[in-house]
Image: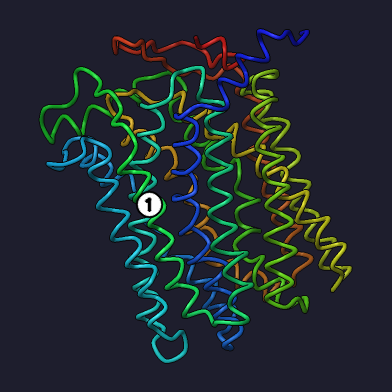
Amino acid sequence: MAITKKSLQAWIQLCFNLRMLITFVMGFSSGLPLLLTISVLQVWMRQEGVDLSTIGLMALVGLPYTLKFVWALFLDRFSLPFLGRRRGWLLLIQVLLGLAIASIGLSDPISSPWLIALLALFVTFFSASQDIVIDAYRREHLTENELGMGSSLYVYGYRTGMLLASGGGLILADSIGFAAVFMLMGMCMAIGIVTTLLSPEPQTPANLPTSLKAAVVEPFREYFTRNSAWTILLFILLYKLGDTLASAMTSPFYVDMGFSSSEIGVTVKLFGFWATLIGAFLGGALILQLGIYRSLWLFGILQMLSTAGFAVLAEVGYNLNMLAAVIGFENLTAGMGTAAYMAFMAALTDKRFTATQYALLTSLMGVPRTLISAPSGYLAEIMGWTEFFILCTVIALPGLWLLRNFSNWHSHSNSEQNKAPEQNQPIPSTIEEKT
């Protein structure tokens, strides 16, 4: 389709407005804490001599990302007496999250491993709670035709936060130490706090649950009465399984390959950051052209190939150019896949129960990162790095098989008047078709 001046102006207006800026900064606040309890803490522990098995078990502190749908219903049902239904919770959670991150810097992974684990658990709990509210805010604040590009800009912000925390944190750790890094990152949560204070409160949907029982029952009843509800959940669980299992052990893998903290920070994080930005932009653009289903197919295959790249790097060994190539491709495909993944899940939620339903869907995304990734350290020790990453590549196949067999997925859409959702409406072939 030819690009006209009018369509170009509409696209620019879609990408550059206040709603998108808020989405970007809130994505930053979501991305900042994630890798602090994964890659940064892993590198710190490995350099202090902690064994791989213990590092792998630390993935269990990510359980709140998997179980967040359990308390999401309280955030849907209750409001704090300030800033509104979404921003009130968000402000409180962000303050507590900043304090939890900074407190890790006051502990030692060797002499106080259980305290480190407890504090990391607090970080993931508040981080998961922040994700619940931000996901709900984004779904309610953006218009229907902004969901695809909004997801891309959210990924931009998310990866920026991850870059600051992991890439910047690892680089700074060589000069100021890991303890100071965690305290500094806790202070960086002030960016999200200021954004929360200055952002508008989304319009409250009609027919909200009026009791705790309704808040518990209705979101799940509404979702599970749809066609293909269980199929969608299984797909969400399996789609990024191989990619996530591999990512759980990449940080100690880089250390074992002989790369220093600065090399990991610069090559893996900074170089990979720009690849992710390009991937997120391409993902948003391709979703508009190909639709969600075909985009998920393409991005899933590319993600599987990027996982295989780590097996190649394991055979090559220490090589900065090879590391940059593997990381660049992996981050490019991750940016593309995440944009389509998030747009897909956002389109499935009912605005009356946004926090609960979106938390249910994204909780399944966290299962591979926590429960399934917990024994990843044992697998890497037993199999070796090359065979481990080959296994992660093969594990990606069930998700692609499921995608192949269920091309006519069903979702629902909410009208602006919050009419009852349709049970059998297929996911649109393009984002514009929803409007």
Look at mark 1 in the image and give the residue it sits on. 128
In the image, taking residue 131 as reference, residue 9 lies left or right, namely right
Q: Amino acid at mark 1?
A: Ala
In the image, taking residue 49 as reference, residue 226 lies left or right, namely left
- Please tell me whether mark 1 sits on a helix, a strand or a loop: helix
- Identify the image quadrant of residue 208: top left
Pick the quarter of the image with the N terminus.
top right
Residue 286: give x, y in percent of width and height.
70, 25
Crowd class of label 1 (few under 14; some 14 to 19; many from 20; radius 10 Å): many
Which coloring applies here?
A: rainbow
* Identity of the residue drawn at 37% across and 14% down: 414
Residue 432: give x, y in percent of width and height.
57, 12
Residue 166: give x, y in percent of width and height.
58, 64
| Vertical placement of residue 361 versus 170, above or below | above
- Identify the image quadrant of residue 415: top left
Residue 151: give x, y in percent of width and height.
54, 33
